[in-house]
Image (cartoon, rainbow, N blue to C red):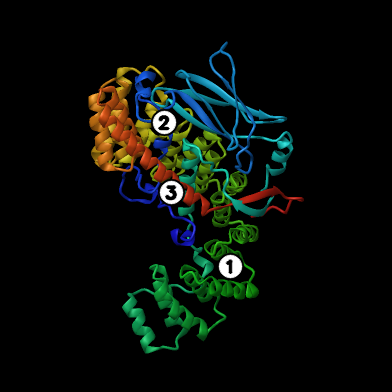
């Protein structure tokens, strides 16, 4: 799948695709945890120590975020309400031009957040600030006053029109956006779950035997359609597009009416970035047969060629001609990739109804629900996916990432991640995510035994994978929360050794040095943190600008629903 989005996707896929268990790589992008913790002080460090740091850090406990509309665009001048314990005054904040808000100088405990602008409002969200998670980032979605009628319209069948594309302005430019970055990572991983063409979509299949055998057959019969087509397809299946092209072209010249070979030829042209030839072959195929398989290929060509508006319409056509699991998945993931998150949710929900035993459809729906800030629903969808296939790592990896990024502990996740660690005892990510889920559930005053359990899981993660930078980072945070700053320094140093670009490890190490009175060492780490954060923010901004965001409007009339 990576080849299909090579022109747009510049971020490498997460470890969800790797056979060996390992913790996050921070070199491609800023991690989820860095976003959550990066601007917070160590647990137990007072404001005085923070003020002595070389950079200006906010108070340890804070709630921040953005208010977005249904298309994911930032909304300015919205009133955000924060309600703490019973009887405490309600705090308010007006969002800025990027839709951002923040509440600082808070205490550990439970809060409720909502926002309003005229008759529009956001659902109430519960937030729990704990020593393990002193900073929470929220994306609130503003619901129009007439949203209930629109929701009913969309309830059963996807009913919307992709009207155009625009630059992605929803990403904003301010700091801690862990939920958004987690959503972006899950979207990339959802795209990686797309399979290729369905088995019956090509008449040509590679013959048994080696490339050398197939080349010998072509040498013996150079005008044989079958020999040329099979050799070309064998190269194509190996990802050797340049080698595949001349043999598929030769087969096409021998028999231009063979649809299977021409589809393979169009794909090879696409992968060689010859968009003109790829589109010409797709048009020829569509003139002969208006099938879902050809429309799906047309969508792949359009997306790779930088025309996502045409691509999403081709995916929609494919799904309506043939509402297969593959076509639902492709349509939904295309919408998700271009941040039409509400509409992607509708398509994946319809796909789950049609294919309730599709684990990947439930996983994709879970990631999409998270993008819609429906964190509990996302967790339930992923738990359901893991129940369908308890040995599949993918749902657990999605669970771990959303559990870390969500503002409060999520239902069913800790139990499933415990099972993940049991089924995959040698998977460092299994133990890391389980540790973070446990820690998040402990609350502001965890017992010694509970802390010991979290520490044991983190130690297991770094033992399995000595390059597990996140594991060392969280071990350092755990020791810092117990005021064992010298021990925390050692863990932070190991985290940096495993990943020198782990910005938060530099920041936390600087705070630990500051607490120990090592002012010069602290300033060095703060300077490194600032430099890395600036570079990573610029990289993320470049990556976001490469992706066009869909502009979506409700359809004027409801189309006929795909039927089985």
User: Residue at 64% of width from left, 34% of height from top?
Assistant: 142
Residue 504 locus on image (x, y percent): 35, 35
Local packing at callout 2 (Cα closer than 10 Å; few below 14, some 14-19, many 20+) is many
Which residue is disc 3 drawn over? 539
Specify the label residue 522 is tagged with.
none
Q: Nearer the viewer, mark 1 or mark 2?
A: 2
Picture quarter containing residue 122? top right
Determine contact: label 1, label 3, CB under 8 Å: no
Residue 237 locus on image (x, y percent): 41, 68
Image vertical order of residue 150 relative to residue 94, above or below = below
Among numbered discs 3 and 2, the one appearing first in the sequence? 2
Q: Nearer the viewer, residue 220 or 238?
A: 238
Local packing at callout 1 (Cα closer than 10 Å; few below 14, some 14-19, many 20+) is many
Which residue is disc 2 drawn over? 39
| Residue 484 appearing in the image | yes
Which residue is disc 1 drawn over? 294
Among numbered discs 1 and 2, the one appearing first in the sequence? 2
Local packing at callout 3 (Cα closer than 10 Å; few below 14, some 14-19, many 20+) is some
Among numbered discs 1 and 3, the one appearing first in the sequence? 1
């Amino acid at each position: 799948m990576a080849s299909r989005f090579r022109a747009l996707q510049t971020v490498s896929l997460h470890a969800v695709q790797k056979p060996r268990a390992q913790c996050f790589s921070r070199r491609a992008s800023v991690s989820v945890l860095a976003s959550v913790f990066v601007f917070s002080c160590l647990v137990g460090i007072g404001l005085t120590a923070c003020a002595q740091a070389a950079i200006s850090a906010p108070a340890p406990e804070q709630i921040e975020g953005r208010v977005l509309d249904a298309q994911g665009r930032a909304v300015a001048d919205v009133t955000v309400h924060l309600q703490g314990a019973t009887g405490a005054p309600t705090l308010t904040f007006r969002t800025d031009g990027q839709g951002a808000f923040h509440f600082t100088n808070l205490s550990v405990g439970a809060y409720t957040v909502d926002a309003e602008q005229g008759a529009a409002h956001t659902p109430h969200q519960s937030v729990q600030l704990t020593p393990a998670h002193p900073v929470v980032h929220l994306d609130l979605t503003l619901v129009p006053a007439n949203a209930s009628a629109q929701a009913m319209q969309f309830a059963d069948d996807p009913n919307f029109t992709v009207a155009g594309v625009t630059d992605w302005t929803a990403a904003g430019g301010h700091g801690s956006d862990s939920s958004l970055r987690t959503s972006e990572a899950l979207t990339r991983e959802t795209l990686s779950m797309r399979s290729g063409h369905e088995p019956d979509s090509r008449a040509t299949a590679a013959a048994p035997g080696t490339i050398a055998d197939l080349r010998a057959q072509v040498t013996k019969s150079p005008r044989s359609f079958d020999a040329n087509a099979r050799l070309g397809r064998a190269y194509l299946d190996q990802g050797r597009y340049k080698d595949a092209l001349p043999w598929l072209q030769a087969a096409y010249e021998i028999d231009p009416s063979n649809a299977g070979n021409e589809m393979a030829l169009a794909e090879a042209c696409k992968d060689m970035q010859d968009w003109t030839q790829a589109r010409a072959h797709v048009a020829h195929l569509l003139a002969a047969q208006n099938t879902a398989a050809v429309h799906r290929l047309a969508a792949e060509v359009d997306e790779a060629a930088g025309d996502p508006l045409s691509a999403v319409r081709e995916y929609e056509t494919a799904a309506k001609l043939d509402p297969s699991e593959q076509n639902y998945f492709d349509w939904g993931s295309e919408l998700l990739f271009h941040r039409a998150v509400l509409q992607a949710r509708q398509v994946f929900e319809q796909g789950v109804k049609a294919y309730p035993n599709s684990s990947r459809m439930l996983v994709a729906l879970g990631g999409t629900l998270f993008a819609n800030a429906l964190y509990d629903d996302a967790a339930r969808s992923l738990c359901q996916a893991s129940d369908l296939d308890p040995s599949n790592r993918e749902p657990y990896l999605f669970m771990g990432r959303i559990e870390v990024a969500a503002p409060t502990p999520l239902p069913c996740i800790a139990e499933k991640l415990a099972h993940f660690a049991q089924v995959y005892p040698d998977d460092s990510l299994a133990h890391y995510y389980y540790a973070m889920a446990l820690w998040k559930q402990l609350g502001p005053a965890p017992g010694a035994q509970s802390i010991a359990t979290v520490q044991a899981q983190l130690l297991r993660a770094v033992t399995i994978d000595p390059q597990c930078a996140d594991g060392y980072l969280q071990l350092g945070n755990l020791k810092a929360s117990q005021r064992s700053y010298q021990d925390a320094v050692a863990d932070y140093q190991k985290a940096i050794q495993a990943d020198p670009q782990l910005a938060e490890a530099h920041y936390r190490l600087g705070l630990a040095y500051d607490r120990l009175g090592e002012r010069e060492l602290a300033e060095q780490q703060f300077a490194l943190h600032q430099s890395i954060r600036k570079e990573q923010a610029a990289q993320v901004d470049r990556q976001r600008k490469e992706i066009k965001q869909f502009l979506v409007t409700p359809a004027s009339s409801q189309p006929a629903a795909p039927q089985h």
